[in-house]
Amino acid sequence: TVLVLDFGSQTAQLIARRVRDQNVFCQLVRHDLSAERIKELAPKGLILSGGPASVYAENAPQVDPEIFNLGIPVLGICYGMQAECRAMGCEVKPSQSREFGHTEMTCDADDPLFRGLPENFTVWMSHGDRVENLDESFVVLAETDDCPNAAIKHKDRPIYGLQFHPEVTHTQHGEHLLGNFIRNICGCEGSWKISSFIEQEVDSIRERVGQSRVICGLSGGVDSSVTAALLYKALGSQLTCIFVDNGLLRKGEREQVEYEFGEHFKTDLHVVDARDRFLEALAGVTDPQKKRKIIGKTFIDVFKDESAGIENAHFLAQGTLYPDVIESGANPDGPAATIKYHHNVGGLPEQLGFELIEPMRMLFKDEVRLMGHELGLPEKLIWRHPFPGPGLAVRCLGEITHDRLETLREADAVLIEELYDSDYYHKVQQAFAVLLPLQTVGVMGDARTYEDVIAIRSVDTDNFMTADWSRLPYDLLQRVSTRIINSVRGVNRVVYDISSKPPSTIEWE
Ligand code: XMP
């Protein structure tokens, strides 16, 4: 294991990601984790992340200076390097020129940290402070025009510092460099694999659960599906899956869950048909936030009713992922600041008196997909676009009725099918149809029509925080439009959404 001490940088998670790309397990921990606790965790290496603060500012996050006496290799990055140097008695000052962006760097290619790299390459800098008077105990390994201490190393201990960011793709050879630190300096073998993680989790789930029953809520999405598949491997018939059909699902979603978890994995699958209950609760509601609230509450009620009848169940499983854990501040060794809190089933376990099982709370999304693949889930499910909890309700603008949902579901299915057939489904990150709350005039045959409008939304995005509209080929859009208008009753117009996020959002509600 390698630990990343998080000083609040946007790229701290990215560092953990890059380390795991080297097949070494990596976790984010609080920047001020005590040396004593680190000694207990016994990592093979420590990486100190960057951070927004200035090390000499009041209340600037500091590191426990004792960690440098543990004999564990340390790599400080940007702020992490400054915190490291300060803790070891060097001076950190504001630079005369702040450095942001690409910079040419010259390094000592003989050092194990730079082994296999050219002497000159481009790195990504982003800092206003820099280490000034290096102590005699440090040597300089690399410099740029504006930064004489771009990379440093302690003379006697395995302690390194980089003023630039090796974790971002703008730094050439960054991955190689991190790999050098992890292998050449920390001595990690790089044998962490998803299959060994599965075995480890299976053992710990069995031990924790004993003879009890575990309930897992299935949504049809990848996270809950992989969670259920893993639990099934660990517990077999001790697992009960609950799938709530709220009538707001995509076409074929319920059938796929029934097949995967009722037939392929023979879990004790409870499919609750709550379509009418949701429709009744949503009748006449058009406000998006009200829709969300009603759906959340109805879901909890339905889930409660269903789980109440299940005997000997003490555990509820959730597909919480690592980024959620970090962002919610729920990680006891994680950064203190709570950025946002989001749980898949907010508040449910506490209300029902369940203990929570979150077998994927240490994994990133792509690792979850890898795990799904390893556990035998179909690729189509693993790579399914994300779908919001309130489902089609927030894509059926205006009032929600059975017929309007049906129109939307059919139009959406046409779009998805065409994206698959043209190999565009995997090139875009999220695509769907939206039913607008208005009618427009058309002409079909010789008759005037006055019917619904379907909007198509498709976005390219890295993280769903920002997004751009997909440049889908015209002939693909044309096929989608023709098929929807010809085959979906009551639709006479299709429009394409060409707004980016921000200022728009991905969903229309
Ligand atoms: P927006 O529309 O905010 O969406 O750009 C960003 C991502 O979040 C999804 N989304 C939701 N997911 N419950 C969810 O579970 C919601 O209420 C919700 N609203 C938006 C959206 O599909 C996109 O992937």
Image (tube, rainbow, N blue to C red):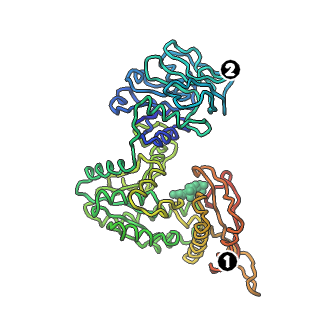
Q: Residue at x 25, y 50 (%)?
A: 207
Find the residue positioned furthest to the top.
Answer: 136
Q: Secondary structure at mark 1?
A: helix
Label 1 with label 2: CB-CB less than 8 Å: no
Relative depth, front residue between 82 and 247: 82
- Residue 154, compared with residue 370, is above or below; it is above
Q: Residues within 10 Å of mark 2 (few under 14, many from 20)?
A: few
- Residue 508: percent from left, percent from top: 63, 61
- In which quadrant of the rendered image does the N terminus lie? top left
Q: Which residue is mark 2?
A: 96
The image quarter in which residue 133 lies: top right
| Residue 387 seen by the camera | no
- Residue 293, compared with residue 503, is above or below; it is below
Q: Which residue is mark 1?
A: 485
Label 1, label 2: how many angstroms apart (C-alpha)? 63 Å
The image quarter in which residue 148 lies: top right
Q: Residue at x 25, y 61 (%)?
A: 312
